[in-house]
Amino acid sequence: MNVVELLGLPALEDQLTRLEPLLLESVVTGDGFLDGVTTHLLAAGGKRLRPVLTLATATSGIDRATEEELLGAVAVELVHLASLYHDDVMDEATIRRNVESVNARFGNLVAIVAGDFLLARSAEIAAGLGTEIAALLANTLGELCRGQVAEVRAAFEIRRSEDSYTEAIAGKTAALMATSCRIGALTAGLPRETIEAFTTFGRTFGMIFQIRDDVLDVIGSEADLGKPAGQDLAEGIYTLPVLRALADPEAGPELRPILGQPLSHPEREKARSIVASSGAITDSVAVARRYADQAVEAAGAASADALGRGLAELARSLVDDLPLD
């Protein structure tokens, strides 16, 4: 997914080119070992989706980003990277972005401390951007933790409710997307009603993004995902497609006895097959489409120009390119 292309704002390419050295500079300390850890996933690339949202919101994809706007984008990306370091420890993941995960290469303890270091650097940058942005980022970190705890508490729970799932993804994914848009709007000094509309877009966009990711965890491949497919199922994280399949009168009785415990590779593949062949994928995409409608409305309220149209197209594309066969 080429986010800049989907947004239709080619000037963002220049903004991202300027962002990369700032990202590296923000995590390099001069300690060779620590620098190798903190730059590991940065060097592996990534879509830079959250910084794109910040910069697009701040500049409308037209103006040249100020240093303050670029630093806002750095702050949100560092929070995202830190969450990946910590998530991979909890998931015992070995691959991330098609490279060895930080915990697999350097060990769990180093990965956790390095993730904490990235959060500290993000907080330091946010503090330099003013008290409102510093408080916003601190609150977002709390939301991320709350969402993650909600997910951990529901592990291997085959009676997990959809409300529990929604609460978890609103915290662990949508909160940072909303903050990415809000920081862009704040650093640009936009009117309050525009700031709120961009924030709503980010929140609803984050919900679509996570549901999409959860659908792809069931029907995608390791090559596409950059990590093993079905990983959530194996680890007892029952997402919307799985919950819908469990509620299905035909798929549920076959799926339920497999779940509730860690899965071997054959069991994981069988569970994926059951979920994928049920109506759960179509149901989940329909839920994502409802969030997309809300995102499109918020994008239009935030901006009537090319940026609003681009954000609306980005939100729709997350749903429209999902294979439903």
Image (cartoon, helix red, strand yellow):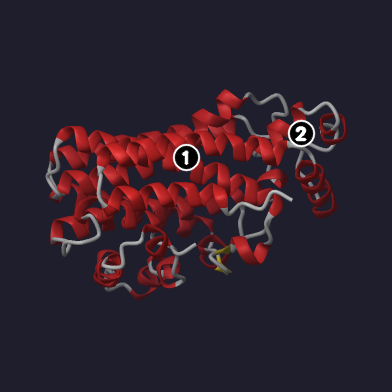
Residue 89 position in % (x across, y down): 55, 52
- Tally of numbered discs: 2
Q: Nearer the viewer, residue 227 or 14?
A: 14
Residue labelled with disc 2: 260
Left or right of 279? Residue 36 is: left
Q: Quadrant of residue 288?
A: top right
Q: In the rendered view, would you say 325 is above or below 25?
A: above
Q: Amino acid at mark 1?
A: Ala
Q: Earlier in the sequence, mark 2 or mark 1?
A: 2
Q: Which element type, helix, strand or loop, lies under badge 1?
A: helix
Residue 175 seen by the camera: no
Q: CA distance from mark 2 to mark 1?
A: 32 Å
Q: Mark on residue 292?
A: 1
Query: Measuring 42% from the left and 60% from the top, which residue is drawn there?
Result: 6
**Rendered residue at 36%/34% (across/down):** 142
In the displayed structure, does residue 279 sit left or right of residue 34? Answer: right
Frontmost residue, 45 versus 139: 45
**Coordinates of residue 24 in the picture (x, y in percent):** 30, 69
Q: Secondary structure at mark 2?
A: loop
- In the image, which disc is placed on residue 47? none
Q: Residue at x 44, y 42 (%)?
A: 206
Could you say where residue 239 lies in the image, as x and y percent from the top left? 63, 37
**Quadrant of residue 186 within the rendered picture:** top left
Residue 112 seen in the current view? yes
Q: Residue 77's spot in the image, x, y percent?
A: 34, 56
Identify residue type, mark 2: Gly
- Name which residue lies at 40% across and 65% down: 5
Q: Residues within 10 Å of mark 1 (few under 14, many from 20)?
A: many
Q: Which of 301 and 284 lies nearest the eye of the viewer? A: 301
Q: Which of the two marks, 2 or 1, is nearer to us in this view?
A: 1
Residue 177 appears left or right of 91? left
